[in-house]
Image: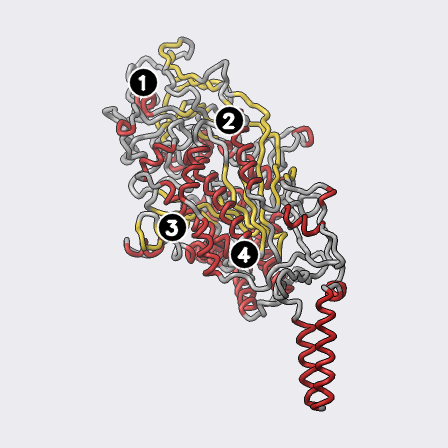
Amino acid sequence: MDTLRKLLQQPSSHTSCFVYRRRPLGGSEGNEMGGTEMKPDQPEPDEDLEAEPNSDITALVVQQPQHRRKTVIYLFLCSLLIFTTGGRGSVACTAFLLGYVAFRGSCHYCGEVGEMVPVEDKPGIDHYPTAGMYPGELRDMLKKYLQDEKIEATIRRVSRTTHPSGSSEGTALAAEILEMFKDLHMDHTWTDSHYATLQFPSRTQRNSLWIVDAEGEEMLEEIPLEDPDSYCAYSAIGTATGGLVYVNYGRQEDFDWLRSAGVSVIGCVVMMRVGGGVSYAEKVLFAQKAGAGGALIYPDPADIPQDPRRLGLNSYTAISEHVHLGSGDPFTPGFPSFNHTQFPPTQSSGLPVIPVQPISANVASKLLSQLSGLACPRGWQGRLPYVRCVLGPGFSSGDGRKVRMGVYNIMKPTLLNNIFSSLEGRIEPDQYIIMGAQRDAWGPGAVKSGVGTAVLLELARTFSHMVKNGFFPRRSLLFVSWDAGDFGNVGATEWLEGYLSMLHLKAVAYFSLDQAVMGDDNLSAFTSPLLADLVESTIKLVEHPRHAGQSIYSQAEREGGQWKSIKSLYLNSGAYSFTAFGGVPAMELRFTEESRVYPFINTPLDTIGRLQEVLGGRLGVVGRSLAELVGLMVLRLAHDHILPLQITSYSQSALHFSTQLNKYSAELQARGLSPQWVFSARGDYSRAAKTLKEDILNSDIQDETMIRIYNTRIMRVEYYFLSQYVSVVETPFRHVLHGRGEHTLSALSEHLSLLTSDPRSFNEARFRRQLALFTWTLQGAANALSGDVWNIDNVF
């Protein structure tokens, strides 16, 4: 920089002999994605660099004097040639002069030694090469810059201590990550802050568990909670006293079985196992619906097939988790938490109304071993060290003893800081591919936040170096460190809520890096169907972390078939809100062990030492494989002219439902209901998607205007499936296929099944409404995808 500045400040008789342009770090004064922008290395006003020539003509005229001298000589020689040879000489000389004038400035450093020629750009437009690097070159460059050691070092650094949101440790880590982003000197770096209401254990009144007498008044025995800091965020506050009933995993089918067996849980404290394919929040919801007064959740050895004694533990420790059936700040549903006073007092309908507490396997064993009552059904028997599995609610003492649980957590307004850094796209800079990871953790969080943060920073470093060495992304790349992920992706959801109206125009796709490495055997992709083809093609290019020379895809084939680990997005996924709430295609990738689960998430035992033990000391290698996989998909999205999103994928979902409707056609017709409207909408969407795909294949890929139109329509596909007929405040997850609520396809299918399983419970008016909500959303998606937004009766 100093050398360049001296060159610019040297006195010269030339108007402009060299143009140096610094890429603006800040862009426009405002920041379109919000927050406070950090602009490192910005020059002082007296250090402004010399401006460019203000037009193409000026750039051509302002040349070094040597060029005038050469031009005079060439003209003299050309005149002599014309005089001696006649017409043929004039043609040759004219061609020569045209070639000289047209191409003499195309080589910036082709003059004599020390001669500099200005860059001839259009005013105000940065100079970028017209020909980008080939995909193979970009893949090689990505692999070259990714480093195992940096990933492992970052995980060690992030997980050196507990760092929950709002803590001094969490704030210090946020400052470190901000500095790391700034050190990369990307185009924009900024923070986005929110005040959200979080829940923490009380320091003055600890949560408790007692065995009491039949009247619930005399405390007979306190059951010590082995880890008093373990808790369920957003649990209801207060006490619950009642008989204890074991309810297996606490799924809806488990409560249905208990009801059919005559076991009532009304007013009781229910005990359920971690797992079973349902989140803590869903377990609590089902318990509430069944009439339970409180809930205890414990890890059973049957679900975590790993001997704790081998790890130096006495028991399976309690596992903390939030129990809000939703994401974001539950006290400002649908609104960003900039300031609670801006919004009417309200709260999410997903907040539980009963107290909930996690307990260890030891505590669960002590309680369950004292129960009496009906024997557990087959499959409910776990592996706790007691003789006989029974359901309760009575204790074997026969004196009517009960359980009393007390939860005294406190609500606390907390400042959250999301940290952003971006590399600006060259052609479509207003379109972003987003990569993000949560930063906070209740424990050390090696898996919960360390892995994701390390992969995020390594991808940011790698892409930053690639840009400095010849990679020119077509679209922008956005790297985000989210706050308050442990409380239900609060930081990410609050940001989404702030920009909900523009996300489908700005965000191409989102990649969640949370909990990405729990093992090194199997890879799973929790994803929107729009990204399924992209991940399946990319795993053919990435080497399996455990099998040198074999790609992830080929290794799956060697083990007995094609790779089929595409899974649906789930509520607690870091990617879920982007798709179900924001209408943005999203994906979360995860390496896991084949024969066991990682048992330490959300516990004080989630350390890098234990993660390294699971991986045999190969944490850096596995993390690099995950980073390479994400990086290659991001390269495709950032580089390709046409976005590689599979817009026809939702046709299959609609077709599956149409097939299901056909099975019930007789029952529907008997009630005066016709599925023809759904069939028509499905056909319209399928034809619109197919037509758009064919139009793209037959288009000129160099026509930037047409490419922009096509990409805009592709980006909106996910957004089209957000129902416009439900309130974002009352029903935030509006996606009809991935969301939650009466408007969704899953709710409609469940209601439809009552026609044969329980006809008396079938509600015709409710079904008509559900069918209309889904069909209108599907028809609207077809109309918008076709490009004809004014015609609701499109003929394809």
CA gap between label 3 and label 4 equals 35 Å
Choose mark 3 or mark 4, whichever is in front. Answer: 4
Whichever of callouts 1 and 4 sits on the residue coming sooner in the sequence is 1
Element at badge 3?
Answer: loop
Spot occupied by residue 350 in the image (x, y as percentages of width and height): 53, 33
Circle 2: is it few (<14), some (14-19), or many (20+) Cα within 10 Å? some
Choose mark 2 or mark 4, whichever is in front. Answer: 4
Report the front residue among 215 and 452: 452
Residue at 46% across, 40% down: 454
Q: Quadrant of the C terminus?
A: bottom right
Amino acid identity at mark 4? Gly
Amino acid identity at mark 1? Phe
Contact flag, marks 1 and 4 (Cβ < 8 Å): no
CA gap between label 2 and label 4 equals 38 Å
Q: Return the residue at label 4.
A: 470
Whichever of callouts 2 and 4 sits on the residue coming sooner in the sequence is 2
Is residue 773 visible in this depiction of the protein?
Answer: no
Q: Return the residue at label 3.
A: 565
96 lies above or below 566: below
Circle 1: is it few (<14), some (14-19), or many (20+) Cα within 10 Å? many
- Specify the label residue 169 is tagged with: 2
Amino acid identity at mark 2? Glu
Whichever of callouts 3 and 4 sits on the residue coming sooner in the sequence is 4
Is residue 359 visible in this depiction of the protein?
Answer: yes
Q: Return the residue at label 1.
A: 395
Whichever of callouts 2 and 1 sits on the residue coming sooner in the sequence is 2
Residue 268 image-quadrant placement:
top left
253 lies above or below 503: above
